Amino acid sequence: MVAREAVVAAINQMVFWSREGGYVAPRYRLAVLAYGETVEDVVGGIRPIDETAAERVFTVRQQTRSDAAAAFAYVERLIQTEINTAPRSPAPLVCHLTDGLLTGDDAAGAVKRLSSLGTSDGPVLVEHVFVSDRILLRPIRDPKQWTGVGPTVELSAAGQRLRALSSTLPESYRHGMLTEGYRIDVGAAMMFPATHPELVRLALVRSASGRSA
């Protein structure tokens, strides 16, 4: 439920930013993937936001185990094709909603290859939103005062793996968060806890304001 609500909130915000007059301009392009032991392409590849916006309900079948490496490799192929056909488009953002327990093959290779891709706008960014209270070793008492997951923040072993797979938050994103009253530090990783819906909204909506996904 948290994941679905977060995705819908991000899409709604992208639609809002894409409105020109009485219609939705295809400013953003979006793919939605669900994965377990297999990868499910929910909306059929990377599609204009004006098409995806009309399909509000995403139905995803439940799976038993997850293969994050396969999911990131699938994203890599999608983005490589997109970049080849639209090299001047905004750089993609890959947002991974996860419980933090990455099973299957090591995803580091696929994430590294993803991060090496980009457009004239910049490199591909990889962000993690974790649905777990076992990643951060210290609880967040006030989301507005939270400084993010910097390089010295104590994390569980699973959290350390996620941090190694996360891009550094761009300054343009961070400044946008500061204007909303948050205190994310310079150099924070693109990692946000889904245990605080406010921070999920911040991660997805603020990040979606800057680039295509």
Image (cartoon, rainbow, N blue to C red):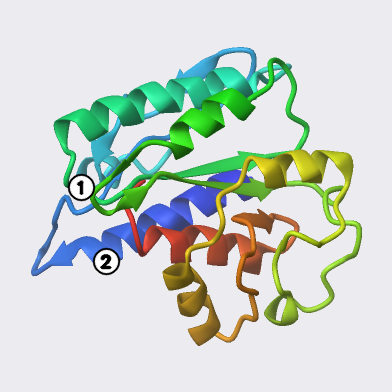
Front in this rendered view, residue 15 or 93: 93
Question: Measured along the vertical axis of the image, is residue 95 above or below residue 121?
Answer: above
Q: Position of residue 170 (x, y in %)?
A: 48, 64
Q: Position of residue 212 (x, y in %)?
A: 31, 50
| Residue beneath the point at 47% across and 70% down | 171
As shown in the figure, which amino acid type bears the numbered disc 2? Answer: Trp
Q: In the figure, is residue 200 to the left or right of 94?
A: right
Front in this rendered view, residue 185 or 53: 185
Q: In the figure, is residue 123 to the left or right of 20?
A: right
Q: Secondary structure at mark 1?
A: loop
Q: Which residue is mark 2?
A: 17
Q: Nearer the viewer, mark 1 or mark 2?
A: 1
* Few, some or many residues within 10 Å of mark 1 (<14, 14–19, 20+): some
Q: Which residue is mark 1?
A: 89
As shown in the figure, which amino acid type bears the numbered disc 1? Answer: Ser
| Residue beneath the point at 29% across and 47% down | 53
Question: Measured along the vertical axis of the image, is residue 208 above or below residue 182?
Answer: above
Q: In the figure, is residue 136 to the left or right of 57?
A: right
Among the two numbered marks 1 and 2 on one chain, the one whose residue lies closer to the N terminus: 2
Q: How many numbered markers are drawn?
A: 2
Q: Position of residue 140 (x, y in %)?
A: 82, 70
| Residue beneath the point at 90% across and 64% down | 138
Q: Position of residue 190 (x, y in %)?
A: 59, 55
Q: Are marks 1 and 2 in contact (CB under 8 Å)?
A: no
**Image quadrant for the N terminus?**
top right
Front in this rendered view, residue 55 or 145: 145
